[in-house]
Amino acid sequence: QQQQQQQQGGNPVTPQPGAASGTNKFLQPIHVCDMSLTDLLNELQHDPWPVPQGKRPLRATGVALSLAVGLLESTFPNTGARIMAFLGGPCTQGPGMVVDNELKNPIRSHHDILKGDARYMKKATKFYDSLAMRTAENGHIVDIYACALDQSGLSEMKAMCNSTGGHMVMGDSFDTSLFKQTFQQVFAKDAKGDFRMAFNATLEVKTSRELKVMGVVGSCISMKKNNGCVSDTEIGVGGTSMWKFCGLSPSTTVAFFFEVANQHSAPVAQGQRGIVQFVLSYQHPSGQRRIRVTTISRNFIDASASQHIHASFDQEASSALLARMAMIKAETDDGPDVLRWLDRSLIRLCQKVGEYMKDDPSSFRLSEAFSMFPQFIFHLRRSQFLQTFNNSPDESAYYK
């Protein structure tokens, strides 16, 4: 896949000094090996090795990913690159295996996970988490395309995509037109002929002294830069003011959470402005290193001035932020606890902005600016993001 990345960058990326000369056997510029690569792909056939009856095919997915990560981190560290993994079934051999090769032993379900009967899950998840961190630290992306009628182990492997900003695609077969169209979209180009993607990005947040950043929910890792604008309270990836994004696309969204510092000991003056600056540095597909700086400011208002809140409240954005916070909580808390937290959040909002007469439920009213928000939360509580009923662990990982 590094061969494709070299084509995207315009100029081949020069290996780092000290890289082993033997890597030229495995990594070449696309214009050098185009014919050979095309011939190899055309000659690919089904694995002729017989699979005994009642057995699963032996797949060493963990070893293959580890090998790809090792090749890139030793030859092209801190250089934009993609690793694409095409899975036709679960890993059944070696590190990262999620099920054995006996068909009589089904792959884990949500019920097995809750009961602690998922024999391979903890060890496999630990393996893929460490592999994802190695990949992300070198600025490389991992895409996973899983097409099979049974589960492929996406639940254990989700960190490979979540930490590196890669794509996760799940389907029934690689032969379907839907998968082919989806895969082609990965290589879509803009009006200038450049791929619609960016690589190896860093994003730093700077704030005025009244604000502190609590964290980020998105496909990134912490760069462990702690300074005066970092809050002690963490949401998502927190404890830092700088994050690394291995891959970005036009549809990438990231949720930032801030808090007002010293609200009680040193209240912010009415009309004062809080300032947030985002400094994004990334590798463009043309090979250039680009920096984009965005600065925004907002007025501080008295919390009792509800007319300002009504005028500026975005129901859809608020629902998306609350959903991201809920999914972060769902990783560590029990499902009922997360649902209760959602309910309490909605009740607090309704108490704050609703109009009602005490002891008269029929008098409750929400203004138009908030009228859809309870419905969004109603559907969020019943969505695949928080409910596991009728979903496999792989499907839950895919939706989240």
Image: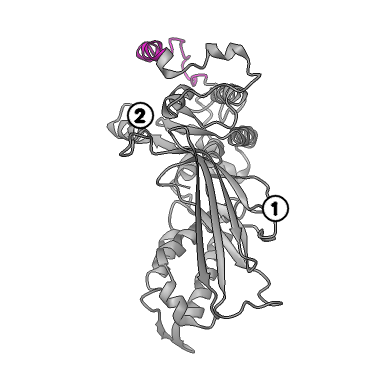
In this view of the protein, can residue 209 be seen by the observer?
yes
Residue 212 position, x and y percent, is 63, 63
* Of marks 1 and 2, the one in the foreground: 1
Residue bearing mark 1: 226
Please give the name of the residue rendered at 46% of the width and 37% of the height, measured from the top-left corner. Answer: 284
Residue 260 position, x and y percent, is 62, 69
Q: Quadrant of residue 75?
A: top right
Query: Is label 2 in a helix, a strand or a loop?
Result: loop
Q: Which mark is residue 276?
A: none
Residue 293 position, x and y percent, is 51, 52
In the image, residue 244 lies in the stretch drawn in magenta: no
Q: Is residue 196 above or below residue 100?
A: below
In this view of the protein, can residue 88 be seen by the observer?
no
Q: Quadrant of residue 207?
A: bottom right
Q: Earlier in the sequence, mark 1 or mark 2?
A: 2
Q: Which residues are magenta?
A: 33-58
Callout 1: few (<14), some (14-19), or many (20+) C-alpha neighbours within 10 Å?
few
Residue bearing mark 2: 173
Color scheme of the displayed model: one colour
